[in-house]
Image: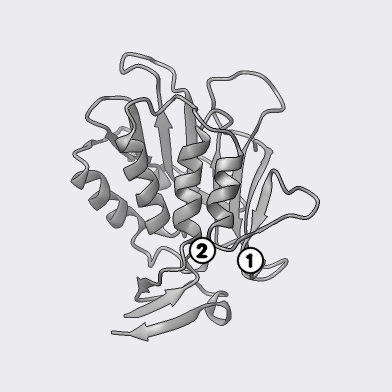
């Protein structure tokens, strides 16, 4: 077992499904399999959903298959979700788990109370750098291998707001310029900024994380803090 930093390059240890399943089970979310061979979890209040969709292979982000889709709705009886967030395989499970805990704690997970600055402030608190040209929308880790940016929403990202040309938070890890992405995440335009901030803060945390394996291509960018 290795304890490594930085978190955003640590990968998911090939345990993304199991780790998030454990988090959701601890939160009391109900789960059942679907006809698409996915696993659907619903929060106790019925306002939030999390679905393991890797088997269905819905689409890709940055050339990687989407593995988890999260959603929130204003009312339990609402047919349409207010927002969706998508995460590929390889995303550090700690950041996704912390996001789910934050979502679960919210009485109104579809309401947006803060602006984009809350996301950037969360990253700045951990030493991430604001982009010189886009200081109000983009931040990068000090090693320039991971970015969180308010960008045009990619295709297939679903949101209750039907307007075109919407922007939402996008984040990705790229160990070296031009190298394949380790993971990508996409938040639709209506995802509350404070929820994105919870993911970003966990992603940027300097605390080492345990891994049995590390992603190919990230070995030279990771620091092993200790072995156990």
Residue for badge 1: 145
**Horizontally, is 164 left or right of 82 in the view?**
right
Q: CA distance from mark 1 to mark 2?
A: 8 Å
Residue located 40% across and 50% down the image: 96
Q: Is residue 186 visible?
A: yes
- The residue at the far bottom in this view is 227
- The residue shown at (44%, 23%) is 81
State the SS at label 1.
loop
| x and y percentages locating residue 206 in the rendered image | 46, 68
Q: How many marks?
A: 2
Task: Relative to 104, say whether 209 is above or below.
Answer: below
x%, y% of residue 121? 57, 49
Quarter of the image that includes the N terminus: bottom left
**Residue lying at 44% horizontally and 83% vertically, measured from the top left:** 224
Q: In the image, which disc is placed on residue 8?
A: 2
Q: Quadrant of residue 49?
A: top left
Residue closer to the observer: 184 or 111: 111
Q: Is residue 66 above or below residue 162?
A: below
The mark that comes first in sequence, 1 or 2, is 2
Pointer 1 and pointer 2: residues touching (CB < 8 Å)? yes
The image shows residue 187, relative to residue 146, as above or below, that is above
In front here: 225 or 64?
A: 225
- SS at mark 2 in the image: helix
């Amino acid at each position: 077992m290795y304890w490594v930093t930085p978190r955003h390059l640590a990968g998911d240890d090939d345990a993304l499904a199991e780790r998030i399943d454990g988090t959701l089970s601890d939160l009391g979310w109900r789960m059942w399999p679907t006809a698409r061979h996915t696993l659907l979890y619903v929060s106790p209040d019925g306002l939030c959903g999390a679905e393991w969709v890797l088997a269905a292979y819905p689409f890709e982000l940055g050339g990687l298959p989407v593995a988890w889709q999260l959603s929130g709705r204003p009312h339990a009886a609402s047919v349409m979700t207010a927002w969706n967030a998508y995460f590929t395989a390889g995303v550090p499970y700690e950041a996704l788990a912390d996001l789910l805990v934050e979502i679960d704690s919210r009485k109104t997970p579809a309401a947006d109370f803060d602006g984009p600055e809350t996301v950037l402030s969360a990253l700045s608190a951990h030493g991430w750098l604001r982009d010189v040209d886009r200081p109000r929308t983009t931040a990068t880790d000090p090693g320039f291998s991971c970015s969180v940016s308010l960008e045009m929403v990619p295709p297939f990202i679903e949101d209750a707001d039907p307007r075109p040309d919407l922007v939402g938070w996008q984040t990705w890890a790229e160990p070296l310029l031009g190298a394949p992405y380790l993971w990508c995440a996409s938040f639709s335009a209506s995802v509350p900024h404070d929820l994105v901030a919870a993911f970003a803060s966990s992603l940027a945390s300097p605390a080492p994380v345990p891994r049995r394996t590390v992603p190919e291509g990230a070995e030279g960018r990771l620091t092993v803090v200790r072995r156990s």
